[in-house]
Amino acid sequence: MKKWRCTVCNYVHEGDTPPEKCPICGVGPEKFVLMEEVQDDLSDKKRDAIQKLLFNVSYGVYIISSIKDEKLNGMVSNTFIQITSTPLKASVCLGKGTLTSEYVRESGVFGVSILGKDNHDLIKHFGYQSGRDVDKFKTVNYVTGEKTGCPGLLDSLCFVECEVEQTIDLGTHYLFIGKVIDGDGFSEEEPMTYAYYHATR
């Protein structure tokens, strides 16, 4: 069975053709790309069970941003994690077809805006449309990172800047490992989790 990935929200559809409409963000079939087949040793039953379990593990929700030739873009992600504390390093995993991934690869930098529980509007704004079609930062309040030039959202809990030290090709995605070089904001409010977002959207 073929797998098709939405280039706007990363939803994966199985079928001979892409869906008429993405059930997550609503875009049409023209926004879907055929995924490369990635083989593993898991049975379909085990893979589905593990995937269901992983979906229930609680992650944060973030806007990952970058810059290329003075153009800005950002996308929703739940894959930003701290790797080491001394030095402070973190990683983010982005789909190869996304514009933000392209910008990170070109510039070698990325920013992370950590979202709070009242930031559903930012998830909709950055997750349900593509930066190839609209300037996502045109209508939001943001600051420009002093070290990287990446945009950070003023309405988020905080903003950190990262410089890519290593890029790992994972087939359908790139894993960017970066050194945290600056940050701003630092609200003490409780951040949004992936589980909270799905329960309250």
Image (spheres, grey):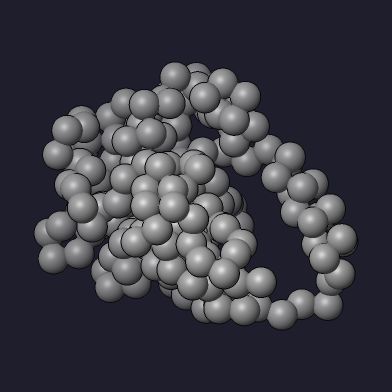
Q: Position of residue 51 (x, y in %)?
A: 75, 54
Whether residue 69 appears in this view of the structure is yes
Q: Going by the image, does 166 lie left or right of 45?
A: left
Whether residue 182 appears in this view of the structure is no
Quadrant in the picture for residue 118: top left
Q: At x 45% / y 57%, what residue is drawn? A: 6
- In terms of depth relative to the viewer, which is nearer, 160 or 112? 112
Q: At x 21% / y 32%, what residue is drawn? A: 140
111 in relation to 186, above or below: below
Q: Position of residue 26 (x, y in %)?
A: 40, 42
Q: At x 28% / y 73%, what residue is drawn? A: 106
Q: At x 38% / y 34%, what residue is drawn? A: 124
Q: Position of residue 174 (x, y in %)?
A: 49, 70
Q: Going by the image, does 186 lie left or right of 91?
A: left
Quadrant location of the N terminus in the rendered image: bottom right
Q: Position of residue 185 (x, y in %)?
A: 35, 30
Quadrant in the picture for residue 142: top left
- In terms of depth relative to the viewer, which is nearer, 58 or 124? 124
77 in relation to 61, above or below: below
- In terms of depth relative to the viewer, which is nearer, 171 or 158? 171
Q: Going by the image, does 150 lie left or right of 82?
A: left
Q: Going by the image, does 1 lie left or right of 27?
A: right
97 in relation to 29, above or below: below
